[in-house]
Amino acid sequence: MISNLKLSGGPLSPLWKLLFCLFFVSCGPTAKLNSIRKSGVNSSLMLPGEGELRRYAGEGRSYAEDSEGLYAMSVKRDEDSGEVTAFENLDAAVIVARFRNTAERAGLIRFDFMIVATDSLQDPSWQLRFYPVLYFENDSLSLSPVYLTGEDFRKAQLKAARKYDSFLSSLSADSSRFVDRGQVDWFKARFPNSDMSDESLERHFRRPLLIGFNAFKKSRQQEYRDKLITTPLEDSSVRRDSTCLDPSRSFVYLYRQSIKSRASLNKFSLKIKTEIWDGKKVLYSFKATEPITYYVSSLSSLTDEALCRRHSGDSTYLKGVALLKQRSWEQALELLADYGDYHSALAYLALEYNATASQILEALGQKSAASHYLLSIAYARRGLEQKAVEELELAVAMEPTYKYRGNLDPEIASIILKYGLFQDYS
């Protein structure tokens, strides 16, 4: 179309054709950015349900596990570069609720969420950066970011990396490379009986200009790198950097994270902050997403006050129970292990010593509802589901509120769902 355009009665010159091409290329991302600003569109923060977990991490899905969580979705892998592209048509139902219950286990709180970027946010020349941030009562914690990199952006990164590698290969630490070998060979042939050593000859026929130029380049190595590589290909602080080869589809990232528990941590919230980068600077910063709140359940809430009253004169026992309430499980176990009672079992269970906890609870004489409930958790963890169901039903028969408590503990919630328990409960 451009080749047929005319200006002042004549065809366009090559320069005008180039200018028109540059204009049309630049209008694409610029128009999209203006549209984003006006529409207020943003990335989404969603909670995955069981269907989404199966969809993005189930059979037939390529996934990889790292030290912090699970990256899982339908993927394409480039055979040459090995680069993974992670995109999905977002046609599954996602949970739009803004809160979720999660459990503290063995000093860790595990939770998951999904980052979603529709095609309207993507452009081949951009890199989207997603920054998850946790908010506690008095402070915050930034999680590792996730990058979504456009194809043209990635090509520019690779080109810059190749140029820098070429620059590095041009540097030399071998001084012999800066010797005029032709002159050395000529001298040896012309004066075969000379008593000059090879080292003396090399010093004599050095090329000072090359040596000086090499030293100059070395002195500017970091400056050249900073100028050339504005966005490094590898960044240890980034959870995942995926290349966008198909910006017409939504990007979905299943983010799984564990954080250390804190004493009396009952809830925390999560927001995502998103930025658009063009390689050197931030083009646009989105408002933070609406938060998701996680309510934390812990075995620490299952301490038995009646037992504490029975041991009111035992400072060691009371200190151990206090440590249980603070979720200092190992220190609590050191003080409570020899008692062999409910609180000892609770400490063992909190540290995943499920068989030991089972033995202690089984040996108790008259069991309380709380003892049956703990035993149900221990059996569920050990895969003894029928026994877990029996103990849970005993606990609920003695204390109906354990039916609702079961929804907070993943081990119990799973068997309630699997066996359809308490559906007719009123």
Image (cartoon, rainbow, N blue to C red):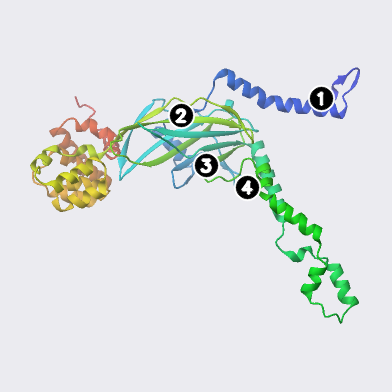
Residue that carries the numbered disc 3 in the rendered image = 238
- Label 2: which residue? 45
Query: Label 1, on which residue?
Result: 2
Q: Quadrant of residue 295?
A: top left
Quick one: SS at disc 1? Answer: helix
Label 2's element?
Answer: strand
Which callout, 1 or 3, points to the residue nearer the camera? Answer: 3
Q: Quadrant of the N terminus?
A: top right
Instruction: Give x and y (percent) for residue 384.
Output: 24, 46
**Dot 3 amino acid type:** Val
Please tell me how crowded label 3 is: few (under 14), some (14-19), or many (20+) other residues with Cα within 10 Å. Answer: some
- Which amino acid, mark 1? Ile
Nearest to N terminus: mark 3 or mark 4: 4
Disc 1 to disc 4: CB gap under 8 Å:
no
Label 4 crowd (10 A; few <14 / some 14-19 / many >=20): few
Q: CA distance from mark 3 to mark 2?
A: 18 Å
Q: Tell me whether the residue at label 1 lies in contact with that at label 3, contact meaning CB atoms closer than 8 angstroms.
A: no
Q: Which of pointers 1 and 2 lies earlier in the amino acid sequence?
A: 1
Could you tell which of marks 1 and 4 lies nearer the N-terminus?
1
Q: Which of pointers 1 and 3 lies earlier in the amino acid sequence? A: 1
CA separation in Å, label 1 and label 4: 35 Å
Tell me the residue at 24%/42% (across/down).
377
Callout 4 secondary element: loop
Vertical placement of 177 versus 334: above or below?
below
Side (left or right) of 72 relative to 4: left
Please identify the residue farthest to the bottom as the structure is shown: 193
The Cα atoms of the two marked residues, 1 and 3, are separated by 42 Å
Q: Nearer the viewer, residue 286 or 62?
A: 286
Would you name the residue on which mark 4 appears? 81
